[in-house]
Image: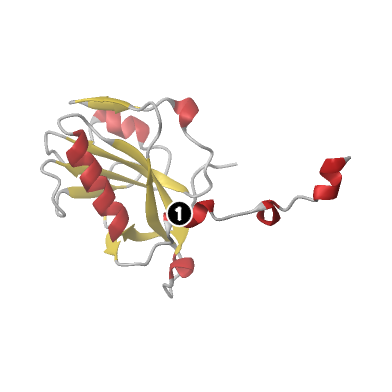
Amino acid sequence: MRLFRSKEILGIAEEALEFALEASKETHPNEYMGFLRGEDARQLGLDRSGTVITDVLIIPGTKSDPTSATVDSNMIPNDMRAVGSIHSHPNGVLQPSDADLDTFGQGQVHIILGHPYRRSDWRAFDQEGKPTTLDVLDVDLPDPESFFDFDEADLDLDLDDLDQ
């Protein structure tokens, strides 16, 4: 089973990009790193087929300094919504390094954010490190708190089987 989807990436939700830019500012002068997750465009009210990047997943235990960020691969969830990675370059260079290219094999899109982390200070790249176009989309994202709105009925358990 592949961890990453093969559907076309239509763009990134404005809220997800703003979150990553803010996180990069807060992490500066160290690198920031996260993983990108997407949602089916039709679920977000778009009349197009494809995936919209909606979330930036922060991995616990990520270590960073001014020239690199590393993730404990044991902490990366097996996520069917994963579409790529995102990280910052505190030096402002919006090109992948050799180390970046080594990590670009997983996922369809990889974003580099550069200091001073303004709305224009980022670029998207494909698996091979070639620049790619990624639109910023103004879509309504689900309330993250709704993730926690469930009860036993949502678990699809037969409670009679548990009593035995």
Could you tell whether 81 is left or right of 127 in the image? right
Quadrant position of the C terminus in the picture: top right
| Residue at the image point whose x is 21% and y is 43% from the top | 113
Quadrant position of the N terminus in the picture: top right
Say which of 62 and 128 sits in front: 62
Which picture quadrant has residue 90?
Answer: top left
- Residue 39, image x, y percentages: 46, 58
Which picture quadrant has residue 70?
Answer: top left
| Residue at the image point whose x is 34% and y is 39% from the top | 34
Could you tell me the amino acid type at mark 1? Glu
Residue receiving disc 1: 145
Task: In the rendered view, tell whether residue 110 sits above or below residue 99.
Answer: below
- Residue 125, image x, y percentages: 28, 47
For label 1, the crowd category at 10 Å Cα-Cα, with few meaning under 14, some 14 to 19 and many 20 or more, is few
Could you tell whether 119 is left or right of 2 in the image? left
Asked if residue 26 shows in the view, the reply is yes
| Number of callouts | 1
Q: Residue furthest right?
A: 164
Could you tell whether 135 is left or right of 45 in the image? left
- Residue 8, image x, y percentages: 42, 59
Could you tell whether 109 is left or right of 155 in the image? left
| Residue at the image point whose x is 36% and y is 37% from the top | 104
- Residue 57, image x, y percentages: 39, 42
